[in-house]
Image (spheres, grey):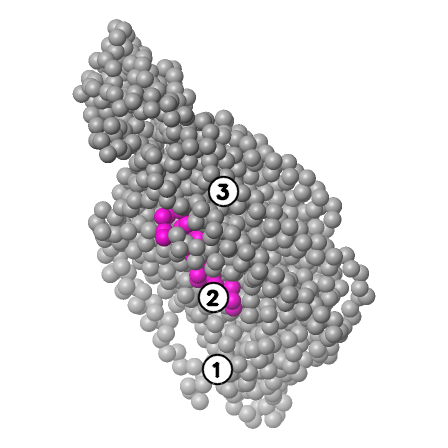
Amino acid sequence: MSDALARRDERDLRDTMVDGSELHARLAKTWGTGRGLIAALSTVDHKIVARRYLVTAFVFLFLGGLSAAAMRIQLARPENQFIGPDLYNQLFTMHGTTMMFLFAVPVMEAVGIYLVPLMLGTRNIAFPRLNAFSYWVFLFGGLFLWVAFILNIGPDVGWFAYTPLSGPQYSPGKRTDVWAQMITFTEIAALATAVEFIVTILKQRAPGMTLDRIPLFVWAILVTSFVIVFAMPAVMVASTMLILDRLIGTHFFNPSEGGDSLLWQHLFWFFGHPEVYIIFLPAAGMVSSIVVAFARRPALGYLPLVLSLIAVGFLSFGLWVHHMFTTGLPQLGAAFFTANSMLIAIPNGIQIFCWIATLWGGKPVFRTPLLFVLGFFFIFVLGGLSGIMLASVPIDTQVHDTYFVVAHFHYVLIGGAVFPLLGAVYYWFPKITGRMMSERLGRWNFWLAFIGFNLAFFPMHLLGLQGMPRRVYTYQPEMGWGTLNLLATIGSVILLISFVLFLWNVVSSNRRGEIAGDNPWDAGTLEWATSSPPPPQNFDRIPLVTSREPLWAERGPLPVVGGLAVDMRQVVVGTVTEARPILRESSPEPSIWPLFAAIAVGGTFLGSIFTPWAVVWGSIPVAITLIGWFWPSGSPEDEK
Amino acid sequence: MSRFSLFLLPAIGFALAGCRGWQSALDAQGPQASELAWLFWIFTWVLGAIWLAVMIALAAALLRSPASRPDPLLVNPAQDRRYAAVVASLAVATGVVVLVLTGLSVVSQRNLFRVEEEAVTIRVTGRQWWWEIRYEEADASRSFTTANEIHLPVGKPVKIILNSADVIHSFWVPSLMGKQDLIKGQENDIRLVADRPGIYRGQCAEFCGLQHAHMGILAVAESQQDFERWRDAQIRPAEPPGDPERQKGQAAFLTQPCIMCHSVRGTPAGGKVAPDLTHVGSRKYLAAGTLPMSRGNLAAWIVDPHGIKPGVNMPTIKLQPDDLNAIASYLEGLK
């Protein structure tokens, strides 16, 4: 250490005073997660939390996938005896609930938690302890559901849990209670991450990253977060009302006592349709990132793409009634929702056109991430167009609740979210692990997934038109649905194999993959400016952003800003529109309390399945853990 | 391009297969179903063409072989402006297509739900997992209750009032009309016409619990004459059995728990929570479209309803073998 430095106050060491490897090492120590179990459980590093989120969400993907495979085996031939109706109903409920609440939403958040701070050039996500808390809540919620399933109290009323079937009269026992409380509980995690994203994106961008320089993926996460904030409370209110009906005898959904079972559907779909876009919008952001990187040119139509994201976010709240066209609503009202549902095709269409135009104007590099994006175009556009059919009230009366709808939303969700997600994993895996994934296995993975998917789900359009309803555990031989169902089952097996291959690629590449380097794809956004994997502090110095693709604009070292503390956790907070730095804000240290708080909240929810008093007694440990969490710890700044 | 053609060939084959089958939405047998099928095909062709155009544009974008781009930021602004103009005009075109399709949909919706003076009113009540069917007439003595099979005169508008006694079900006979839900606490209705005599199958389309899969319904469209004959027969109470076997069956039936739930008009059996059996032998299927009607299937059903339809509300009742045969024979004779 130099003499000049020694004279300074140790506690106010700034990054302008040290350099190179010493700066790197000191920051890594300040921001790092210590060794040992307690440290691991206390970490607030967004990258570590995101990795846990990712791994957990993919475990749930495989559990959801295996339950789908079991259902496909049951449906492979008519009157099959492989699975009875009781288990089948649990399986399709678990499949839907897991895929929607434990895989699709969390996995998109996981990618966001990992990438958003890196893309914005900051050192951690806002409210990092809340972030750690949200992971534990998500984990416990998922465990809760799957342990219940193993104990044969898995929910069996569908992921939509329509009343009165899910009410106390027609679903006695604990199964639906498990579902209702699991939903309320895990949505806390989604809401928490949404709040973190909004604050991080609006306030913690690197200096110079004005609103029109925010990467498209980050825009997508921002819009998604606002959708979550407005949509999730609807389902939490609904599931709470359901548990009240079941547990303490309220009658919100009981028509015999002045309740209304359709109220459930309104509340559920007011969340349920935005949910589709909560899953799709981040995926659209991934597509934008991959298209730009592999077309090797800036996005054509950055502004229309951003405006489309925002428009989709808004319109997604005006579509919910198209799930209810056959419930006997007034005709004019239904027609209004037809118009609204079709309207959303315009912003979605604009995004597709912009991406194709970007590819057209660039020089596409055909690597695995781009292959998955091309698969996305093929599948998602088809799913989107069949969605336009479902928006029409008359057509919907025929295909609603049939396999046509099953085909449609798997085209939209697997095509629109899972294909981009797999592409994103191939794309960002080098950043997260420092190693490339195998290109050869990646191509096999893609083609098997693409062929398997279409073979599994295209026939379902025809099954729906031939009259096969959803959620049936079997069908009679004389219906003539056997061949197409067998084909779908074969396709689903191929799809499953492709996922096993994907898993193998991830595991083996993580050990033996080619070393990636900082920026293996020569991409332009900030996450590629730091090492792979990034150090705990993300960046030794906060970059100064002058363009949308800083790494393309500056071929040498990036310009940086200085002045942040080295021995304390500090992030730059800036203005909302121009990201002009306005203050240095301290960022919380690791803490074990978020874990304890999640255990306390989880215990309360678990207990509430058995007695309403659990809410009263549970509030005590929740209060204690929150006091511990927020106990003033005397930060170094305060002591100065 | 090869993967596109690979995919399209089987797709066309399947599409043709989609028209057949006795529960098919595209096998239209009435004006409502024809309207729906017509609208479906219009949408399919328009949207299919759009999908193809997008795929061709994508393929063209990929197959161009421009020079490599060492500097990704080097773009041609004039060219980009042209691309932007194309994107903008495609966005406008999307708007126009969406507008036209919305218009077609709304017009079709008006045709579909047009109210015509009905010739027959049928009240269908959904129950876990069967359909209670009541033909309603102004003259109460000509109203009657049956189950799982509706008959309708060809060419006459039929009004179907839909309600549920328990959870939500959905009434759907694809060859005649789109579906409509049966919801406790509210009354929905649909109107439909059958163009040709025939037997059209339908099925509950809203998940309603364990036996949602076995909740079928038959719609039998027949000439006015046949319909009247059927209706007159249904209005009459059950005829007392003639032969000793069936007499024994009736006696056994009336002394067993069967009558706690089932009705046979003209006998003391007056249960109201299970299907009315007054003319059960005249129905084509048993247990809501699950088994074809026959004496053997009746006996199999009575012996082990939970083996055939696990979770069904009908309990298993221990019967002596000859009582069982007698009851099956009695029920089969209830034409």
Is residue A374 toward the left or the right of residue B144 in the image? right
Q: Element type at marker 2?
A: helix
Query: Would you say residue A532 is visible in this rendering?
Result: no
Residue bearing the label numbered 2: A314
Q: Element type at marker 3?
A: helix
Image x and y of residue B317, in percent: 27, 21
Give the CA distance from mark 2 to mark 3: 33 Å
Q: Residues within 10 Å of mark 1 (few under 14, many from 20)?
A: few
In terms of depth relative to the viewer, which is nearer, A190 or B279?
Answer: B279
Chain to which mark 3 belongs: B
A88 above or below A607? above
Q: Which mark is residue B74?
A: none
Image x and y of residue B189, in percent: 34, 42
Give the CA distance from mark 3 to mark 1: 64 Å
Residue bearing the label numbered 1: A585
Q: Mark 3, mark 1: which one is toward the viewer? A: 3
Query: Would you say residue B154 is visible in this rendering?
Result: yes
Which stretch did the figure color magenta?
Answer: A310-330
The answer to whether residue A404 is magenta is no
Q: Element type at marker 1?
A: strand
Residue bearing the label numbered 3: B35
Residue A546 sits in which quadrant? bottom right
Q: Earlier in the sequence, mark 1 or mark 2?
A: 2
The majority secondary structure of the magenta stretch comes to helix
Q: Residues within 10 Å of mark 3 (few under 14, many from 20)?
A: some
Image x and y of residue A231, in percent: 41, 62
Q: CB under 8 Å between callouts 1 and 2? A: no
Is residue A318 toward the left or the right of residue A355 in the image? left
Residue pictured at 38% horizontal, 36% vertical: B157
